[in-house]
Amino acid sequence: MYLDVSNSTRRLMWTLAHAHGTLLGMVHVIFGLSLQVLPELDSHRLPLISFSLIGASVLLPGGFLLGGIAFYSGDPGLGIAVVPVGATLLLLAVLLIARSISTIVSKSSSQKKQ
């Protein structure tokens, strides 16, 4: 089913699912390590960041996986429709992390000036 030449769409979708799942797993590990290094990250944003990362980790690879299960004339299946939602959640998490880090940097630079 996976290696059949006529199923190149399935193979591409499942390869994308695997790659996105692996890379998002590394993002989770890096984010967890950053919490150890920067414990002063905005605690009120952490639940939203965590929810966004978990949602992205489910929807991005899951959408590619579902898109490869049933496909139509070389086009991915309807499961691919959740991929943009997962990408939006990932973008939201990255923006929130960047804002939290910029807040830490601005606080530390203002303390050094005093």
Image: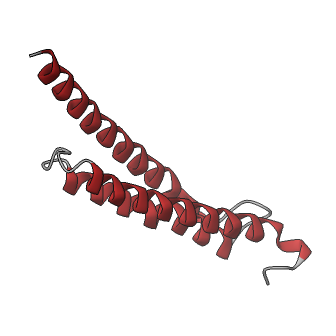
Residue shown at the point (61%, 66%) measured from the top left: 17
Residue shown at the point (74%, 70%) measured from the top left: 10
- In the displayed structure, 18 sits above or below 45; it is below
In percent of width and height, residue 106 lies at: 21, 24
The number of discs equals 0
Q: Nearer the viewer, residue 55 or 79?
A: 55
Report the residue that reaches farthest toward the left.
114
Residue shown at the point (17%, 45%) measured from the top left: 40
Here the colouring is secondary structure
Q: Is residue 57 left or right of residue 33?
A: right
Report the residue that reaches farthest toward the top.
113
Report the residue that reaches farthest toward the bottom.
1
- In the displayed structure, 108 sits above or below 85; it is above
Q: Nearer the viewer, residue 44 or 68?
A: 44
The quarter of the picture where the C terminus appears is top left
In percent of width and height, residue 8 lies at: 83, 67
Residue shown at the point (77%, 65%) measured from the top left: 9
The quarter of the picture where the N terminus appears is bottom right
Report the residue that reaches farthest toward the right.
5
In percent of width and height, residue 92 lies at: 35, 43
In percent of width and height, residue 60 lies at: 51, 60
- In the displayed structure, 25 sits above or below 40; it is below
Q: Is residue 33 left or right of residue 87?
A: left
